[in-house]
Amino acid sequence: MTDQIEHDLNLLPQWGPYTKKYIGTSHISDKVHGIRFDLSIFPGIYRRKTELPNVMFETNHFPWRANARLSHYSFRHMIEWKDLVYCDIDYLLQDENTQAFKANFVNNTNVSQTLALHFLASIHFAGKKEYEPDNYLQPAIVNLVKDVSWINSNQYTRYISNKVSPTDNLNPDGKFKYETLEDGYVNGSRIEFAHSIGDNISYDLSKTIGNVIKLRYHSTHDTCITLKLDENKQQVLQLPKNNEPTLILLTKIDQIYQQITLIANEDNTFYLDGLLIGNEDYIDLTTFELLNLETTPEVINFNDAYILKYPQISQYYGIRFFASDYELREFISDNLDTFFAKNANEHVQRKLIDKPGEHHYTNWYLRPLNIRANHQHNIYGLVTCGNYTDVTNKLKEATLHTLQNDFDQLTKKSISATLGQQIISATMLSNVVYPVYTCGKYIRHSTPGRWWDCLYTWDSGFIGLGLLELDIERAKENLRVYLTSELAENKFIHHGSPVPVQFYLANEIFNKSSDLTFVTNIFASLLQYYRFLRGSIGSSNTDRFKSGLLQTWSYFYNSGGWDDYPAQKYCHDNDIIKDVTPVITTAHVIRAAKILFKFAMITNHYHNVINELNHDIQTLSSNLDKYSWDKEYGYYSYVMHDSDGNVVNKLTAPDGSNFNQGLDGLYPLISNTSNESQTDRMLKHLQNPTEIFSTIGLSAVSQAAGYYRNDGYWNGTVWFSHQWFFWKAMFDHTQHEFADKIAKIALNIWEQECALSYRSLEHFVIETGRGAGWSSFSGLSCPQINWFHAYYCTYRINLGLDCSLLDQINSEDSILLNVQKFTYKPSLILFVIPDNWSKFKCYVNDQIIQSKTTFSKTAYWLELPNSSEGSKFNILIKRI
């Protein structure tokens, strides 16, 4: 059941900003066990305040610049706010094994400053679970000998349990069925087995040789299983209880078998580690040992450089910096932030121990660095890895002149942008962590913020949309992380709110690339993703009511990412959530079906699913109108059901009003399936400044509702994620002026906040207009990048969700587009012309059409007229 899709970010180098501890540069030391080497570089005030750049809470470091492939990135470390005294630290990839760095100290005051620079080297291991990166996993390592094979427990070909769960085909985080990570198991993975009598799990033996099969398992009780080889030979085996994973003989075989199956004879769970298969003459020579979690390296002084060798890593790490006044120190502490600060004035000891046996850090302390008033000072160096000879050669070859030239060339290539765009782009691109466990492997992952050191489905979709504007291949790779192959057990990769942003990302990738091969390659994966959300495949229970309305509460507590959305919170607080359907789930599934329908029509393939998609679109749209639409309030409602799945009523607030006066109640604007009267009423709510459209953008909850608050996480704030969906919907509702308002206000408040705080934040408080939330956040704030490019990036084309861009040809004097429209209604196109075009004309199918202006001097709207569904338009935008 192993997924055939690669989920790692292979476009990125092995060196990068992948830490979960202190910002700097990291190297992937061991892909199998998820081991990471960190080198954090940060400034301080000599013998005074030194703040470690911890990435798990807000400290005075700021993502500053980054390119899309992370061969260069930088952080600004603020010593005296704002930009009076600071240090910009740049990281530049020299080759696949070497990262160069430059620390640029800037003193903008009228007095000299006495500063310091720290290099902090450390090794880090995979954690047992998400959000606990320091809770290290200690897996077992199997040392195989000749002709002996190991099959990990999660490498099963089939796992059938009589205890059916909604997550059987959507296990969280891409894990395998009943998989957990725990100490003592090979690669740290174990499979819980025997939830019910008759449960069976099968493994492929076709690539193994030998006449002995052993099982490694752990059970707190005696248990019994049946062993089956292929489809005939069976035997009953007793498995005695044990205190830890233990190897036991299963059987000896006298012929070649293709498959082994274990069948539970009792409903009393125990843990499988794996199978050991080999010849009886060699199999007992196999040994198991625990991964060494020692963090203290051997430190080798090599001329003007240092080499580190950690006991569990084969390669060496070398560091060289061009500065002479420094001390080499060691810190041993699991609470380094406090311990380091306490010892800022320590000038005697070189080995500082908080508690023996705690985490080891190697510290090079460069001091004092005397920076004259209104002057700058640079320190250069590099860190490299490889075998001992490669590392020593690299350290010997390094010269200050070469490093200076490399960084000087980088400065010449730098591209200017607005400060807000610089900050959100640098934050998004550098927010990558390692290790993250999924599908049996450790991967690098683009995270919305390092506190979320894990997968996150809907946030990552928006990261992909942001990447699309900077590097389309990175956007495709981001999408691939969350898709699975047709043979995979999980129908997509899921963590968090199941908002299917991946469909919108795929749609936007196609509109920017017109790449039919891309669509063909992902269609099957998207289709099974869709069918699972639709409730028509595998273990999905999203479609469990007679109303045909959908819900995803079995997979996550949150329907739309909006944690404290009033109706959702009320249903959880009153334990009625399982009987309620929100609007957003059904609306997004309708739109996902429409996107797949477009892809099927454009590629002229997949005709077998067109009827299915059309039927789903019509049925789900009808269900929303029949059961959810509230004529009195002009919103779609949460719908209550009884235990038999029958509709009971629309959910009302304690004051008797509709409980869905917020973005969820307007989500059919995105699916675009409501009638004209319903659409008009929803648009009025959306655009009313006393309801949804606040002074700083779209409020998640109507400001006129009795349950609106000013202190909520979502209730009383503006987020850009759902705002992007509604902005795109305005194209299909021909509301160009309101689309402009959404984008302009969002861009303005973003630039204002970035100028004030240098922070890329989660959301904005309506009462103050100030940003709040995680301090280095990308994720749901990435639409900032999309809006900027939509209005200011030359030749950028944006369409409504009901249209597809089949081709685009740009020249110095023209833009030629081929657009297909999958609605009979009119729809808008937003395009950006070169800034040297003083005049131009627009032709649609050879007819002159008048464009409409925006707040950007180079961005314009064009309206496609009513037409039959599937009509194609040749559009020429020509300079005159």
Image (cartoon, rainbow, N blue to C red):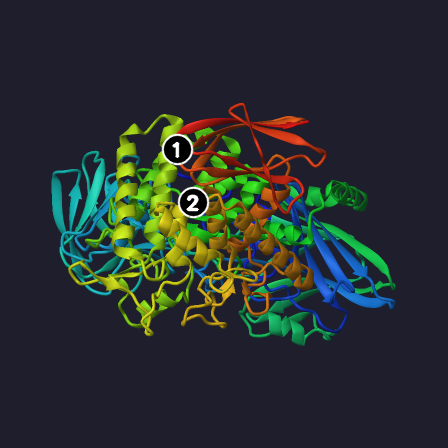
Do we see residue 98 in this rendering? yes
Classify mark 2: helix, strand or loop: helix
Say which quarter of the image contains residue 695.
bottom right
Q: Please name whichever residue, 186 or 624, is drawn nearer the observer in this view of the structure.
A: 624
Report how far apart the C-alphas of labels 1 and 2 lie in the structure.
Answer: 14 Å
Q: Residue at x 82, y 62 (%)?
A: 108
Task: Quarter of the image for the C terminus: give it.
Answer: top right
Neighbour tally class for label 1: few under 14, some 14-19, many 20 plus, Cα within 10 Å: many
Between disc 1 and disc 2, the foreground one is 1
Horizontal arrangement in the rendering, residue 64 relative to residue 568 (left or right): right
Q: Is residue 166 above or below residue 484?
A: below
Measured as percent of width and height from the top left, residue 508 is found at: 48, 39
Residue on which disc 1 sits: 599
Measured as percent of width and height from the top left, residue 369 is found at: 81, 63
Checking the image for residue 502, the label placed there is: 2
Neighbour tally class for label 2: few under 14, some 14-19, many 20 plus, Cα within 10 Å: many
Measured as percent of width and height from the top left, residue 579 is found at: 24, 62
The amino acid type of the residue labelled 1 equals: Phe
Horizontal arrangement in the rendering, residue 331 relative to residue 869 (left or right): right
Q: Residue at x 41, y 54 (%)?
A: 682
The amino acid type of the residue labelled 2 equals: Gln
Say which quarter of the image contains residue 758.
bottom right
Q: Please name whichever residue, 806 or 563, is drawn nearer the observer in this view of the structure.
A: 806
